[in-house]
C-alpha cells in the first residue's frame, strides 16, 4: 500500500490515493509515470490541431528584476546573471572576432517550470519515505536524485488542451483561494468543445497572470500591466483533491496551471499540506507545471473557438534534476 497510515491522515485521503495510484502500472522499474500515455497517436492529435502555424510562448520572464520569487521558500531565488567575458578578442586581430558570454544561477522552479516526480515524497519516516512507484526518498541526496530525474523525460510533445476555468465561469480571474472542482473542469471542456483523450496535457487557466507585470503583454481588458506578487501568490485559486480522480479517469499525461502552487491555497484541509502534490507526483506519477502564462493563449482560443494545440513543453535535461524551467510553446 503506497499511502502511509497515520492517525493524522484521514481515511478519505488514503482511500483516494489507493484509487488513483499508478504504482506498478507500467512495471516496477517505471520512472515516467503518466507521461507513458503520450504516444504517437497523442502527438498526431496535436499536429492535427495546428491550423495557422501561430506559435505562442507560455513562459514567464527569467529575470532577477522581473522574477516572481519572494523568499517564501528558502533558496528558491530568481535568476542572477553575471558576465564571463565582454567583447573578448578571440583572434590576434582585435578587429576580427570577439566574444561575450554570461553565466546564470537560478532555482529550477523559480519561474515557469515542471515539478519532477522526485520533487516531493511521503517524508522520511520509519520506512525511509517513498517516491512514486515505491522508490525510496533516500534516492534524493545533495547530488540530486538517482531515480525519477527530470532528464529521463527526454521530450514532452503532445496535444495540449486549454481548460479556461475563469472564462467558463464568466470571469477574468478566479478569486484567491477558489477551489477548482471536477464540475469546473467539465464546464471548461464544454466551453472549448473538448474531449480529453489519453496522453493529452491539460493547461488549467485561473487568470492569475493578471497580477503580474509582463513586458509587452497588456493587463486585463488592455489595461496597463500591474505587479502584485502578494495577490498572485496568496491566497491562490487552484485544483482540489477531487480533480485528481477526474485526471486519473481520463489518463491525462500532465497538468499545468497559471498559479504559483497549482493546487488551491490555503489547502482544503489545514491538517493536510499540499495533498494534491502528493497525489499527483507520488501516487499518480504525474508531473505538475506551475507559473505558466496562459492569457495570450486563452485570448487566441476564445477568438476562434479552438482550445486544442500542439504543445512542446520539453524540460531541460538536467541530469538527476528535481524539476526544470521551461518555455512551453503552443502551436495553433
Image (cartoon, rainbow, N blue to C red):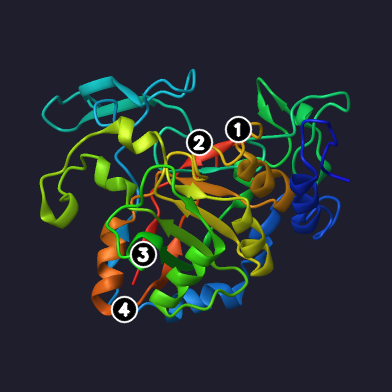
Distance from the alpha carbon under mark 3 to that under mark 1: 27 Å
Secondary structure of residue under mark 2? loop
What is the number of the mark on residue 87? none
Circle 2 is placed at which residue position?
A: 266
Q: Which numbered disc, 3 or 4, marks the residue closer to the eye?
A: 3
Circle 1 packing at 10 Å, graded few (<14), some (14-19), many (20+), is few
Which of the pair 27/244 is nearer the observer?
A: 244
In the image, residue 124 sits, relative to residue 250, either above or below, namely: above
Which of the pair 226/148 is nearer the observer?
A: 226
Which of the pair 223/102 is nearer the observer?
A: 223
Circle 3 is placed at which residue position?
A: 169
In the image, what residue occupies the spot 55% across and 48% down?
Answer: 288
Q: Can residue 315 be seen in this snapshot?
A: no
In primary-sequence order, the first of circles 4 and 1 is: 1
In the image, what residue occupies the spot 60% across and 68% down?
Answer: 199
Instruction: Please state if 111 lies on the left or on the right of 144 as rendered.
Output: left
* Residue 61 found in image quarter: top left
In the image, residue 135 sits, relative to residue 140, either above or below, namely: below
Secondary structure of residue under mark 3? loop
In the image, residue 163 sits, relative to residue 293, either above or below, namely: below
Distance from the alpha carbon under mark 2 to that under mark 1: 8 Å
Q: Position of residue 252 (x, y in %)?
A: 61, 64
Distance from the alpha carbon under mark 4 to that under mark 2: 33 Å
Q: Position of residue 34 (x, y in %)?
A: 67, 58
Distance from the alpha carbon under mark 4 to that under mark 1: 39 Å
Q: Are marks 4 and 2 in contact (CB under 8 Å)?
A: no
Distance from the alpha carbon under mark 3 to that under mark 4: 16 Å
Amino acid at each position: 500500500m503506497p499511502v502511509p497510515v497515520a492517525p493524522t491522515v484521514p481515511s478519505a485521503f488514503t482511500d483516494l490515493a489507493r484509487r488513483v495510484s499508478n504504482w506498478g502500472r507500467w512495471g516496477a522499474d517505471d520512472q515516467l509515470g503518466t507521461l507513458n500515455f503520450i504516444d504517437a497517436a497523442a502527438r498526431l492529435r496535436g499536429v492535427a490541431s495546428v491550423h495557422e502555424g501561430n506559435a505562442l510562448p507560455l513562459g514567464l520572464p527569467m529575470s532577477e528584476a522581473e522574477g516572481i520569487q519572494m523568499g517564501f521558500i528558502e533558496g528558491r531565488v530568481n535568476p542572477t546573471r553575471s558576465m564571463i567575458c565582454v567583447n573578448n578578442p578571440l583572434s590576434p586581430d582585435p578587429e576580427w572576432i570577439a566574444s561575450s558570454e554570461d553565466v546564470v544561477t537560478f532555482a529550477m522552479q523559480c519561474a515557469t517550470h515542471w515539478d519532477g516526480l522526485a520533487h516531493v515524497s511521503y517524508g522520511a519516516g520509519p520506512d525511509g519515505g517513498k517516491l512514486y512507484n515505491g522508490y525510496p526518498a533516500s534516492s534524493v541526496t545533495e547530488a540530486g536524485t538517482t531515480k525519477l530525474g527530470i532528464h529521463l523525460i527526454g521530450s514532452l510533445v503532445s496535444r495540449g488542451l486549454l481548460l479556461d476555468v475563469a472564462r467558463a465561469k464568466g470571469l477574468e480571474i478566479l478569486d484567491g483561494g477558489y477551489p477548482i472542482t471536477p464540475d469546473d473542469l467539465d464546464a471548461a471542456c464544454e466551453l472549448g468543445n473538448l474531449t480529453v483523450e489519453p496522453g493529452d496535457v491539460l493547461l488549467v487557466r485561473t487568470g492569475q497572470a493578471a497580477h503580474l507585470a509582463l513586458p509587452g503583454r497588456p493587463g486585463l481588458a488592455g489595461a496597463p500591466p500591474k505587479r502584485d506578487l502578494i495577490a498572485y501568490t496568496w491566497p491562490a485559486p487552484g485544483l482540489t483533491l477531487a480533480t485528481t480522480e477526474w485526471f486519473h479517469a481520463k489518463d491525462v499525461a500532465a497538468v499545468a496551471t497559471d498559479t504559483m502552487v497549482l493546487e488551491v491555497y490555503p489547502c482544503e484541509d489545514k491538517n493536510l499540506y499540499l495533498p494534491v502534490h502528493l497525489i499527483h507526483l507520488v501516487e499518480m506519477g504525474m508531473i505538475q507545471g506551475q507559473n505558466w502564462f496562459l492569457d495570450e493563449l486563452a485570448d487566441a482560443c476564445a477568438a476562434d473557438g479552438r482550445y486544442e494545440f500542439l504543445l512542446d513543453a520539453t524540460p531541460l535535461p538536467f541530469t538527476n534534476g528535481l524539476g526544470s524551467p521551461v518555455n512551453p510553446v503552443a502551436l495553433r
